[in-house]
Amino acid sequence: MRTLQVDLGDRSYPIYIGQNLLNDPQWLRPFVKGSQVCVVTNETIALLYLDRVLALLDGLQVSTVVLPDGEAHKTLDVLSTIYDRLLEDRHNRTTTLIALGGGVVGDMTGYAAASYQRGVDFIQIPTTLLSQVDSSVGGKTGVNHPLGKNMIGAFHQPNAVVIDTDVLSTLPPRELSAGIAEVIKYGLIADVDFYQWLEQNVERLMVCDTDALEEAIERSCQNKADVVAQDEREGGIRAILNLGHTFGHAIETAQGYGNWLHGEAVATGMLMALDLSAREGAITAQEVERLRTLLQRAKLPVVSPEDMTEQQFMDLMAVDKKVLDGQLRLVLLDQVGAASVTNQFDVENLKQTLASI
Amino acid sequence: MRTLQVDLGDRSYPIYIGQNLLNDPQWLRPFVKGSQVCVVTNETIALLYLDRVLALLDGLQVSTVVLPDGEAHKTLDVLSTIYDRLLEDRHNRTTTLIALGGGVVGDMTGYAAASYQRGVDFIQIPTTLLSQVDSSVGGKTGVNHPLGKNMIGAFHQPNAVVIDTDVLSTLPPRELSAGIAEVIKYGLIADVDFYQWLEQNVERLMVCDTDALEEAIERSCQNKADVVAQDEREGGIRAILNLGHTFGHAIETAQGYGNWLHGEAVATGMLMALDLSAREGAITAQEVERLRTLLQRAKLPVVSPEDMTEQQFMDLMAVDKKVLDGQLRLVLLDQVGAASVTNQFDVENLKQTLASI
């Protein structure tokens, strides 16, 4: 059992990481301030864990919303169904929303909490490795638009994040791998020791070894929390958390949300970012191969979709949130363990990267 | 020409009030930080003032969105059309949205700005008296839900507010009256001198006397800005700005958005709030009559819709944002010029108020 504090002044909050946390109300109840809660989950997770969470909420007025499962449903229309339930059940400003699920449930519940009555409390119970190490930290919430991912949203911090590592035992292997992609990212952008640790332990993560999972989750969350504490609203440094994401979002958008998992697209996108970093001379070609090997060990894709053209990539990347006054900016590695956002790269190198991966 | 500063730390902004401001770029251009702007207006205002505003934006990448006119269109679906335009025209995080219109345009544009890419800049050019004195100050943005008004939204402050009093010459008399209702509110809740000034000058406002309008707008904005500066996110005192609004929202919801103007519903709602305040012994019955007379001079309704039952009022008021843990709270007068939010009132008195007005 580990506790991490995300330090954001009066929006600070704890992250609890451990086994069996969903059988004990002490991690959840202190963060419910009023008498109303609304648990938002999806149809897959509802069958597995909803009853267990409801048992922790005895004595409160509890509503539940069960969303369809998958990134394809992270839309304004589906978001609306959360507002509908809150209003039908007369939730007021003192209500607390609880996100029980992966990144899609977390992003949508967080955004519903940010916007319902101009802002109510929420708690995250992330049930995928990816959401445990990524979307549960940092306060980014939102939904997709047909023309771009996460284009509608808000910054809204949770009151607490409860990470029960036991829930990963029911996670499909492909989703576990997708989570490991984001774990690897923290090593690449900020923590070379952790990157080496991952090279030694990735197979332990693949079989859900509890100690290895707790270690990986804690170090990922800590790395992310450190970056977010420096730059809550992404004016600068925070953008390095998007290593591989500009490429990855283009893949996700082109393939239709949900066909490639977010972590899979990020894996391939990170390899592209390192390939471009190598072409720009910041790192060696060996470092690109080193990442390729690690991604392959984690059963992650290392080649972009066959049917995607270079022009499609360029068009889709042009609407990325990091574009500033028409200039595409990308997160590139300065070295393994350090990254920065830049528009200083040769477009010919970018085209070669797109052609080669 | 008057300038007012709304004091909110790093979210402070100026309000410019005067004649002919829409013919001079100096009030607008310093607040556009990037090279992209998107002007959001409605079909009525577009015909009157859109060209004038576009002329101020020479040299920038300008998109325009023309919304249907009226409160009935303040919905998530119509909001979506703003996101569509922004994404089709590839607006990035440095874009500035400009709200050119009344409260509906201001609220929706502000909320689009709050949520597009998790927050971009915006500027208000309010074109109704009501939006000039009310919705352009304080950062409340949002849209309606079929089950309640302004239930989805955010706090998001503009970079600047440009109030050109000349635009009121094209405002229908009924809408001018609706604006005067909110002006009267500031006298009732916070400024007894201003209330007396209004009793002396209401007819000058009704004929759009420029000096009287500038005075009324400045004092209203100043009173609102003072309250908002104390309590930006409505944890306490700010709620007094909702005098008459709980009753008024119930009327608007019951009648369908747009059939009663917001200001008209607030006028009748304020009379109900004063009637209840008198029944509770805080003010005299003469003060109720004094307000009734002033509202009638401003051609505002002083009787609730014939077809609304007491039960309908009670049901609709139960979803008000001021409800806390099931307890209805109302803004009542302590005396003319001072108000507070309370759940301490006799429900029988409330029923008598609902029956009598």
Image: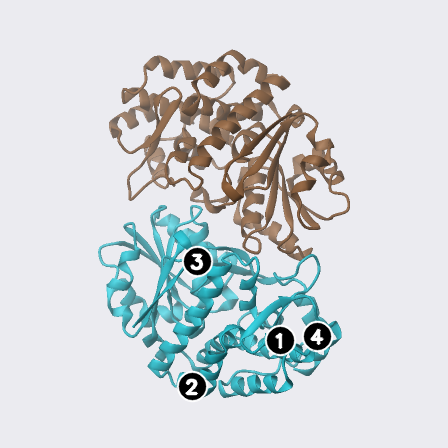
Chain colours: A cyan, B brown
Subunit of label 1:
A
Q: Mark 4 points at which residue?
A: A350
Q: Where, quadrant-wise, is the N terminus of chain B in this rendering?
A: top right
> Which chain does tag 2 point to?
A
Q: Is mark 4 on a helix, strand or loop?
A: helix
Residues under labels 1 and 3: Cα distance?
Answer: 29 Å
Whichever of callouts 4 and 3 sits on the residue coming sooner in the sequence is: 3
The label on residue A201 is 2
Q: What element carries label 2?
A: helix
Task: Name the mark on residue A273.
Answer: 1
Counting the numbered discs, the total is 4
Task: Indicate which disc, 1 or 4, sits on the residue closer to the N terminus.
Answer: 1
- Residues at badges 4 and 3 in contact (C-beta under 8 Å)? no
The alpha-carbon separation of the residues under discs 2 and 3 comes to 32 Å
Q: Mark 3 points at which residue?
A: A110
SS state under label 1: helix
Q: What residue type is labelled 2?
A: Asn
